Amino acid sequence: MSSGYRYEGGPEWWRHAVICQVYPQSYQDTDGDGMGDLPGILSRLGHLSWLGVGAVWLSPVYPSPMVDGGYDVSDYTGIDPRFGTMEDFDRLLSAMREAGIRLILDCVPNHSSDRHPWFAESRASRGNPRRDWYVWADPARDGGPPNNWLSRFGGSAWKLDEGTGQYYYHAFHEAQPDLNWRNPAVREAMAEVLRFWLRRGADGFRLDATGVLIEDALLRDDPPKPDAGDSTPPPERQKRVFTDSRPEAIDCIVGLREALDEFPERLLMGEADVSTDRATRFYGGRDRPALHFPLNFRLLDTPWDARSLAAAIDEYLNIVPPHGWPCWALGGHDKRRIAGCVGPAQARVAAMLHMTLPGTAIFYAGDEIGMPNVEIPADRGQDPFEKLVPGYDLSRDPERTPMRWDSGPKAGFTTGEPWLPIGPDVETVNVATQRDDPRSILALYRALIALRRERTALRGNGCEPLRSEGDVLAFRRRAGGQGVLVALNLGAEAASFSLGDRGRVLLSTHLDRAGEACSGALQLRPDEGLVLALG
């Protein structure tokens, strides 16, 4: 491992805030229709404030046919009646301001719904002024799709429009046609969408699917993946050379960043591939910045052992450019929940790792109480991903189930029928029960967020990895004359770590060793993480 990592940067709020992603359908229902809404989020704002959250990333609440969970937008500057009204949005934003919590909106710039007025005009005729707002191409010589590009939702990424005799491109569902980002009018229209919400008071945006904003202009075929086999889902059997992470996409993001920078202290983060050094592209350059940071899910996507995690952390921190800033997301609406992946005991260790690494920390609502991935009966499934690509366990419903507020049969989420099943273990995995338990994972999340806020060393931009053996992962953080050491036992057996210094326990994942003095060999219990003040 390298000797350490450092990044430039000032005191922007997003560098040190803990951000919670709220999936509105699943947070709190107030009208009994079984789906969460904006008044529901407002009613639960006290929980986020008590927890110490600095910002909320809100998944889409725009008008949508809901083919893909709201990520098929039919009006970029409205509120879907399922979630409430614009007045409800304004009330929520005002209350968040009073609570000191920032609001980050999800923006979906790659594609719209096929019911968006822009697309209705675009498909009306080849001569329509908005024809070039979407990606159209003539059929191949045999009359089929223009090339071999695959949709993430299975099958060809091209849909024939019978009325005009051309195909339109859809990187995702056929009801989500891709906007043509080579068209300056599209770029300006989407920049104006950002300005609309920024004027209203939004603190920033998470850009959906930024890696696929632009495709190869020559429409060249994607090559097959050499290692793809029968167990590989069909949409993933191509190497997306010509359809993903194209360098031209950065210019699109730079334009959006320029619109954002017209407003002070706003954040632009985005969904992009950070599995390779291509992540560097999405930061842009010092003179032409793009994203403040692309979302990084490596903690979720890496095998859960000390060696693999140490390597993944090192690799990622070394590709973040000096003018960039790291980000760690431990959950999300498209990712299996961490507690379901590593188990309840290691979910606590994961939370400590997540909150003590350098960079912005993002968690998914429900992870703070250790919510599991819920098995969804076939007749209750909602996700089109599973319906269109069956048999590969691709459904995102298991991580989208409703938030558990109490131990009642509907977990305090709704008085109606919840849109997805609540799941098991509600009697212990809920907010009310865990708030009464000083050693719950909820109490640990609150303590970790407070520790990030209070300890200068955890707000700094440096990190020194430490060599350790077996199941222990360890590193040091220093800033402002303070030093902390983080040691994490990723195993189910007791372990020791050579401290090489004197320290005092600030926090244990077991929530029972605060103030304990340590020197020499540091003893870690099974599934225990410690944060120590050094010196």
Image (tube, helix red, strand yellow):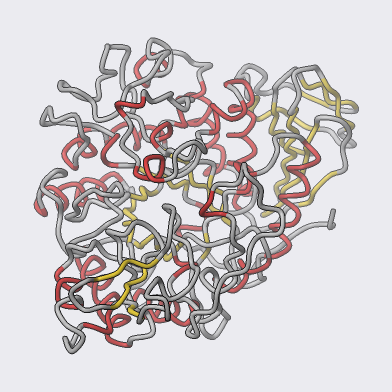
Could you say which is closer to the camera, residue 69 or residue 22?
Answer: 69
Against 4, is 364 above or below?
above
Report x, y in % for residue 358: 64, 52
Q: Position of residue 477 (x, y in %)?
A: 72, 48
Camera-nearest residue between 413 and 176: 176
State which quadrant residue 204 falls in.
bottom left
Q: Is residue 80 left or right of residue 58?
A: left
Which residue corresponds to the image point at 32% horizontal and 88% vertical from the top-left? 184
At a point 29% along the width and 34% down the height, the residue shown is: 27
- Which residue of the protein is positioned furthest toward the front in this rendering? 142
Quadrant of the rendered image containing residue 422: top left
Q: Position of residue 185 (x, y in %)?
A: 27, 86
Q: Quadrant of residue 142?
A: bottom left
- Residue at 83%, 22% (x, y): give it: 495
Tag count: 0
Query: Which quadrant would the C terminus be assigned to in this image?
Result: top right
Give x and y (percent) for residue 99. Answer: 29, 44
Q: Nearer the viewer, residue 403 or 484?
A: 403
Image height of 282 relative to 252, above or below? above
Judge from the rendering whether residue 298 lies leftward or rightward of residue 182; answer left or right.
right
225 w.r.t. 39: above or below: below
Asked if residue 490 is positioned above or below residue 132 in the image, the reply reads above
Q: Residue at x 55, y 33 (%)?
A: 338
